[in-house]
Amino acid sequence: MFILYIYKSSIGLIAIKFDKNVNKLALWINDDCYGFYTSKAAAADDVAQFETGCYDWDCLYGTATYPRDIREWEKI
C-alpha cells in the first residue's frame, strides 16, 4: 500500500492510499481505514462532505477547514 494524497487535518493525517491487495483506493484517517473507492475524487468528496464514517471527522461538519476537492490535497 502506498500513499497518493494527504491532508493534514485538525484531527490528524487523512490519506488516500492505493491498496494493491484489493486494487482500489483506500481512505485512511490516522491509523484506520474508512473505506475503499474506485477514484481519488470519490474519496476526497466523502472527506469534503464529512461522510467518511469517522466520527471525529464527520462531527466537525460546518466548523472545520477542509479540502473542497482533490486539487487541495497534497500529492505525494
Image (cartoon, helix red, strand yellow):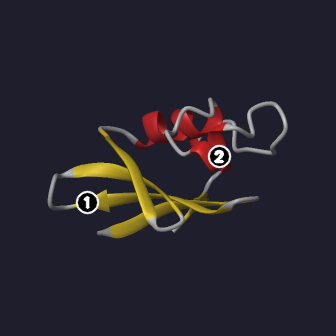
Up-down relation of residue 60 to residue 29 (above or below): above
Q: Which residue is mark 1?
A: 19
Residue 27 pos. (x, y %): 43, 51
Does residue 63 appear left or right of residue 68 in this picture?
Answer: right
Question: Which residue is more in the foreground, 6 or 75?
Answer: 6
Q: Tell me the crowding category of disc 1: few under 14, some 14 to 19, or many 20 or more residues within 10 angstroms, Cα based.
A: some
Quadrant of residue 40 within the rendered picture: top left
Mark 2: which amino acid? Answer: Trp
Quadrant of residue 66 within the rendered picture: top right
Task: State the SS at label 2.
Answer: helix
Mark 1: which amino acid? Answer: Asp
Residue 8 pos. (x, y %): 68, 63
Question: Which residue is more in the foreground, 75 or 53?
Answer: 53
Up-down relation of residue 27 to residue 8 (above or below): above
Q: How many marks?
A: 2
Task: State the SS at label 1.
Answer: strand
Per the rendering, the mark at residue 33 is none
Residue 65 pos. (x, y %): 81, 45
Q: Residue at x 54, y 65 (%)?
A: 30
Q: Which residue is mark 2?
A: 57
Does residue 74 appear left or right of residue 38 in this picture?
Answer: right
Question: Which residue is more in the foreground, 29 or 1?
Answer: 29
Does residue 57 appear left or right of residue 35 in this picture?
Answer: right
